[in-house]
Image (cartoon, rainbow, N blue to C red):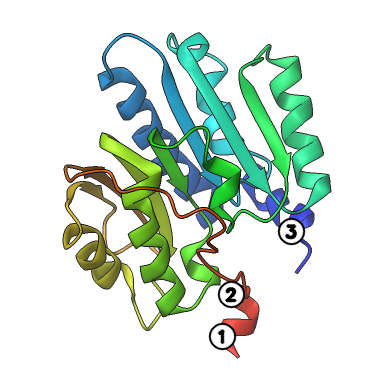
């Protein structure tokens, strides 16, 4: 899979990718709008070109309150994210080229007020999805929010993902319509934040094209 070329789908407003982005952006804005005054910490796993978070921050009143770290393995995508952040004057956004599954990338920003896991759950196996949800009890601050995505193709794992979050102290804030081919969810953590396990790996990125086969 060419993950740089994959991002070209965002340029077609009618594509499911573009429609999903609109839903994700709305959840990000809702978190920023409802957060109390003061600094906000955001981490984004497998961030790609960062079109979701960066696209919201560029004109959001809370942009200067946000310290964010975007972690993405493809250097072409991180270069695009870095260029956008610089052009927008988002100096508190850090873009890291690296393996987003490694919790050490987030150790100094966890627990975060907003955790973005978009474009991940459809590309990893079920056991790794649950392991990543479990890790969110360390990555996400109490009162913080996880925004996540997963396709609705059979077998539809969205209900199970909701169950995994909710069994770990997360409250469902919003879930996209089941009629869509994509799923977008937002869960707020109401439990006790757990220590981050240094050196842990949350998942192995397999790719949806491989998983379908």
Between 183 and 163, the one nearer to me in the picture: 163
Could you tell me which quadrant the N terminus lies in? bottom right
Q: Residues within 10 Å of mark 2 (few under 14, many from 20)?
A: some
* Residue 132 percent coordinates (x, y): 42, 62
Q: Earlier in the sequence, mark 3 or mark 1?
A: 3
Between 157 and 176, the one nearer to me in the picture: 157
Q: Residue under label 2, please give it.
A: 208
Instruction: Please identify the quarter of the rendering in which residue 71 is found.
Output: top right
Q: Determine whether, in the image, residue 97 is placed left or right of residue 207.
A: right
- Give the number of the disc on residue 3: 3
Relative to 15, say whether 132 is above or below: below
Instruction: Please identify the quarter of the rendering in which residue 192 is found.
Output: top left
> Does the rendering let one see residue 26?
yes
Q: Determine whether, in the image, residue 83 is placed left or right of residue 204.
A: right
* Residue 12 percent coordinates (x, y): 63, 47
Q: Are marks 1 and 2 in contact (CB under 8 Å)?
A: yes
Q: Residues within 10 Å of mark 3 (few under 14, many from 20)?
A: few
């Amino acid at each position: 899979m060419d993950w740089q070329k994959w991002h070209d789908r965002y340029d077609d407003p009618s594509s499911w990718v573009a429609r999903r982005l609109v839903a994700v952006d709305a959840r990000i804005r809702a978190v920023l709008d409802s957060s109390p005054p003061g600094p906000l910490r955001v981490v984004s796993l497998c961030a790609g070109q960062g079109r979701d978070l960066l696209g919201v921050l560029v004109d959001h009143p809370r942009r200067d309150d946000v310290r964010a770290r975007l972690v993405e393995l493809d250097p072409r995508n991180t270069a695009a994210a870095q260029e956008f952040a610089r052009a927008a004057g988002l100096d508190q956004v850090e873009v890291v080229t690296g393996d987003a599954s490694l919790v050490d990338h987030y150790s100094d920003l966890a627990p975060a007020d907003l955790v973005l896991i978009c474009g991940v759950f459809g590309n990893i196996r079920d056991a790794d999805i649950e392991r990543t949800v479990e890790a969110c009890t360390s990555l996400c601050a109490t009162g913080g929010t996880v925004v996540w995505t997963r396709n609705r193709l059979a077998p539809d794992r969205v209900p199970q993902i909701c169950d995994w979050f909710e069994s770990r102290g997360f409250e469902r804030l919003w879930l996209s319509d089941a009629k869509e081919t994509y799923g977008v969810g937002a869960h707020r953590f109401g439990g006790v934040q757990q220590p981050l396990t240094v050196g842990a790996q949350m998942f192995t990125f397999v790719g949806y094209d491989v998983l379908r086969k």
